[in-house]
Amino acid sequence: GAITGDPDYESKFEQAEIHLLEQGYSVVNPAANAYGIDFSYKDFIDMDLMALTKCDAIYLLKGWGKSKGARLELQYAVTVGLDVYCQEDEESESSYSV
């Protein structure tokens, strides 16, 4: 999901994390990586991609297409064959691999 430019991103990511934890998933929440630490945008992207290397799937929050970082993470996930799940698809309980 989008972080840059979204003043409510922390809440959105936390809600998604709780939702996934309740379903039994282990969650890496990129919005919770470094609260209060002054990293550059590149640093956050580097950390997010490094964390994604240890994941089996990616979960895209609503509006992810507006985020350059989320699109980059999706491209990585597709390239290495991770499962891709999308919050928008949950109502139909569908997921997809791209």
Image (cartoon, helix red, strand yellow):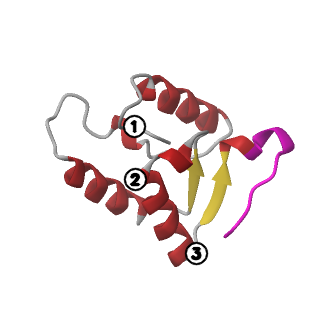
Q: Residues within 10 Å of mark 3 (few under 14, many from 20)?
A: few
**Mark closer to the observer (1, 3):** 1
CA–CA distance in space, label 2 to label 3 = 18 Å
Give the CA separation, mark 1 to mark 3: 24 Å
Mark linked to residue 81: 3
Q: From where the camera sits, is residue 63 visible?
A: yes
The residue positioned 66% from the left and 49% from the top of the image is: 86
Q: Specify the amino acid type for callout 2.
A: Gly
In the displayed structure, would residue 5 be above or below residue 24?
A: above
Farthest left residue in view: 38
Identify the mark nearer the N-term, 1 or 2: 1
* Left or right: where 65 falls relative to 91: left
Q: Secondary structure at mark 3?
A: loop
Which quarter of the figure has residue 45?
Answer: bottom left
- The magenta span reads 89-98
> Cα distance, mark 1 to mark 2?
9 Å
- Are the residues flagged by discs 1 and 2 in contact, CB closer than 8 Å? yes
Give x and y (percent) for residue 95: 75, 56
Crowding at mark 1 (Cα within 10 Å: few <14, some 14-19, many 20+): some
Q: Residue type at mark 1?
A: Ile
Q: Position of residue 47 (x, y in %)?
A: 28, 55
Query: Which residue is at 76% across, 42% downward?
Result: 90
For label 2, the residue is 69
The earlier-in-sequence mark between 1 and 3 is 1
Percent coordinates x, y for residue 75 in the rendering: 50, 68
Of the pair 6 and 83, the residue shown nearer to us: 6
Q: Residue at 66% across / 53% down in the picture?
A: 85
Tag 1 near tag 3, CB within 8 Å: no
Q: Amino acid at mark 3?
A: Gly
Q: Which mark is residue 3?
A: 1
